[in-house]
């Protein structure tokens, strides 16, 4: 039987991945810093600080997973892009995948990022064609990690996939991120101070992202795959949709803050490769995803 | 004053780099496994096994270099491409550059490789345009290392360049490599068993390569730079030139061995970026470089 180890099972996407994994017939191990997590008798929890390479290697030796879904990484909103922790995560992740190979691992899936790409305006990012030229420390370390994973896979003979995640939103979204921030302001009648909101992003409903990561884990193919929807949506659309649902469009102040430096105007996934190689259900429409968040708050 | 630390100073290219560094007004530290090296009272030698991240960090803390020329890596002919040591070198190199930044380093230059590129037939490799899609474990780990270097540079504020070395030849070339192998056979009157030799490569005379690495170390620019000549030369040309010089063309057996798997037919540097950004003397012509090797053997 598949013995899956998931790292970062308590993060935003990791939580959804763990829930999605429960639908599969497999033995599930989860590792985080504190072992504190929701109870489920199908999951065996382990405690380790995976930023420490020695602890990363030890957890692999203990669990000996056949399948590794590696989501743990620094993800603190507004901080992760340039956090020095990225380099620690890169180092320990290389140790982790090396140990995975040494202990007989057969399938690795890692959480990459759209931040690895150098996107061109109006052109969706294609996994094997769009240049990898990350602007942030986070993007550079993620791209380096994927190369290291491929090297370890080639050495040890395990297969590996890398899911480049676009812009997730949904239940469990950390409060400092876009959708929860806007909802909090609208709920409390506070003005929503935002940029012009003209940038286009590929918003993916978090449970859909988790579903794709788990499909990748069960699939055989080597390579990078976009975790997106292929739909370009402006930030403005999302904010206006939420304000309309609350009936408070007057709270929106577009342009109240200047554009964020280094943010590309267009960052959208090409989903052809996923479509061709994975069984891929239609992604949740952005309106429907936002509606589900709002109704969960009622 | 610049305090330079060179790693891998006893390797094929490292030896030439160290010699070239002696022309500069700087304090020179060199680290290798055994501290055994040619005597020169301007060089302070240190012993460390840099495959061990802890030793890599310790040497940086001891020397506190302002400039780091990182050449150490597995380079055993015919083995290095798929050696598991590549992953150890990747891990410890990330630790090395992190420590370099933490201890106030200001300029890093690393030895990358043409093996990082996915070259197209007939098209020279352009640093910022040709896709990075390495076929070997070596190429993957080198490409991952460069991304990690850039992340560390961004975090700590040091500048960094990455020299992607094409096909070096010259004094000190390890005996298992092309030119010394062919010369050894011709000298002893043995048949030279080779492939058809139709593949085109960018042969660079090792002292020229070292000169470019040291120019990069003294330059300010961030980025990857090709260490080549821009000239495409067939393997066959090199072998025939040597046989002609020995007057023994009858010893050549082209096609006696099959093509090596995974070797691209065309791997040549575009030198425009080097030409534009570095003061770059004309490279040694392949005939002249081979002549110099032969006369050194007389």
Image (cartoon, coloured by chain):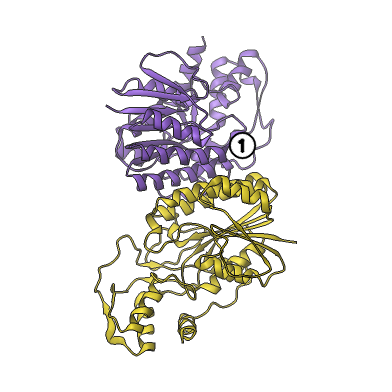
Chain colours: A purple, B yellow
Q: Is residue B164 left or right of residue A189?
A: left
Q: Residue furthest top?
A: A298
Residue B15 in percent (x, y) is at 55, 68
Note whether B9 is above or below B292 in the view shown.
above
Q: Quick one: label 1, few (<14), some, or many (20+) residues within 10 Å?
A: some
B241 or A140, which is in the foreground? B241
Rendered-image quadrant of the N terminus of chain B: bottom right
Question: What's the chain of the residue with tag 1?
Answer: A
Which residue appears at 53% of the width and 43% of the height?
A141
Residue B66 in percent (x, y) is at 69, 56
Which residue appears at 48% of the width and 17% of the height?
A37
Residue B166 in percent (x, y) is at 46, 67
The answer to whether residue B133 is visible is: no
Note whether B33 is above or below B26 in the view shown.
above
Which residue appears at 52% of the width and 41% of the height?
A91
A209 or A241, which is in the foreground? A209
Residue B232 image-quadrant placement: bottom left
Q: Which residue is mark 1?
A: A83
């Amino acid at each position: 039987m598949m013995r899956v180890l998931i790292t970062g099972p308590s993060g935003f996407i990791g939580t959804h991945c763990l829930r999605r994994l429960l639908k599969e017939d497999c033995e599930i191990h989860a590792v985080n810093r504190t072992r504190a997590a929701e109870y489920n008798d199908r999951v065996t929890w382990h405690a380790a600080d995976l930023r420490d390479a020695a602890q990363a290697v030890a957890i692999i030796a203990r669990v000996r997973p056949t399948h590794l879904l590696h989501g743990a990484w620094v993800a603190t909103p507004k901080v992760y892009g340039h956090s020095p922790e990225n380099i620690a995560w890169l180092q320990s992740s290389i140790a982790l995948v090396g140990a995975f190979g040494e202990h007989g691992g057969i399938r690795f899936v890692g959480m990459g990022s759209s931040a690895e790409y150098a996107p061109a305006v109006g052109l969706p990012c294609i996994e094997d064609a769009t240049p990898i030229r990350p602007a942030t420390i986070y993007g550079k370390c993620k791209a380096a990690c994927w190369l290291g994973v491929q090297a370890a896979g080639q050495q040890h003979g395990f297969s590996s996939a890398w899911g480049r995640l676009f812009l997730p939103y949904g239940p469990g979204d950390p409060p400092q991120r876009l959708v929860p921030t806007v909802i909090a302001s609208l709920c409390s009648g506070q003005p929503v101070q935002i940029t012009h909101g003209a940038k286009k992003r590929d918003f993916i409903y978090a449970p859909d992202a988790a579903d794709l990561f788990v499909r990748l884990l069960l699939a055989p193919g080597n390579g990078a795959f976009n975790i997106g929807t292929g739909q370009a949506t402006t930030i403005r659309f999302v904010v206006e949709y939420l304000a309309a649902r609350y009936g408070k469009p007057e709270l929106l102040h577009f342009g109240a803050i200047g554009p964020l430096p280094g943010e590309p105007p267009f960052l959208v996934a090409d989903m052809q490769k996923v479509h061709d190689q994975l069984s891929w259900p239609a992604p949740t429409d952005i309106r429907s995803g936002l509606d589900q968040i709002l109704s969960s708050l009622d």
